[in-house]
Amino acid sequence: MYFPTSAILIEFLILAIVEKEDSYGYEISQTVKLIANIKESTLYPILKKLESAHFVTTYTQEHQGRKRKYYAITDLGRAQVSFLKGEWLSYTTAVNDIIEGRLRHDKD
């Protein structure tokens, strides 16, 4: 996509993904890549930050003979997703209002 993606938006996307179901890093990265051109080297520090903030927790599970680290949302993470959804709604509404000409700064 043409528009750059901020770290906070990537955090929001990750939390929204794991809110629906536990997921592992590669799977999360493939979903985020649908809208953001990020590398795994960008994703994993953000996952670590979310874990340090207690928004997600991790566990290991074996899959086809290999161990995968899964991320699961915490109650604090659910609260953060709820907050970010409200912020996103306000942001996108304002952007759409400007694009559609419904919101303008009054000239002095």
Image (spheres, rainbow, N blue to C red):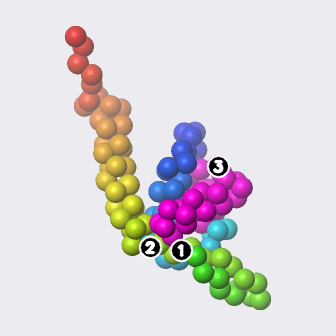
Give coordinates of residue 46: x percent, y percent. Answer: 59, 57
Mark 2 / mark 3, whichever is N-terminal: 3
Question: Label for residue 82?
Answer: none
Q: Are marks 2 and 1 in contact (CB under 8 Å)?
A: yes
Q: Which residue matches tag 1?
A: 57
Give the residue drawn at x 67%, y 53%: 42
Q: Main secondary structure of the magenta part?
A: helix
Q: Is residue 45 visible?
A: yes
Q: Secondary structure at mark 3?
A: loop
Give the residue drawn at x 62%, y 73%: 24
* Classed neighbour count for the residue bearing mark 3: other residues with Cα under 10 Å, few (<14), some (14–19), many (≥20): few
Q: Which residue matches tag 2?
A: 74
Mark whose residue sits in front, 1 or 3: 1
The C terminus - image quarter = top left
Question: Label for residue 37?
Answer: 3
Numbered range of the magenta stretch: 28-57
Q: Secondary structure at mark 2?
A: loop
* Classed neighbour count for the residue bearing mark 1: other residues with Cα under 10 Å, few (<14), some (14–19), many (≥20): some
Q: Secondary structure at mark 1?
A: strand
* Classed neighbour count for the residue bearing mark 2: other residues with Cα under 10 Å, few (<14), some (14–19), many (≥20): some
Task: Give left or right: position of 87 versus 55.
Answer: left
Amino acid on which disc 1 is placed = Thr
The span from disc 2 to disc 1 (Cα, nearest Å) is 7 Å
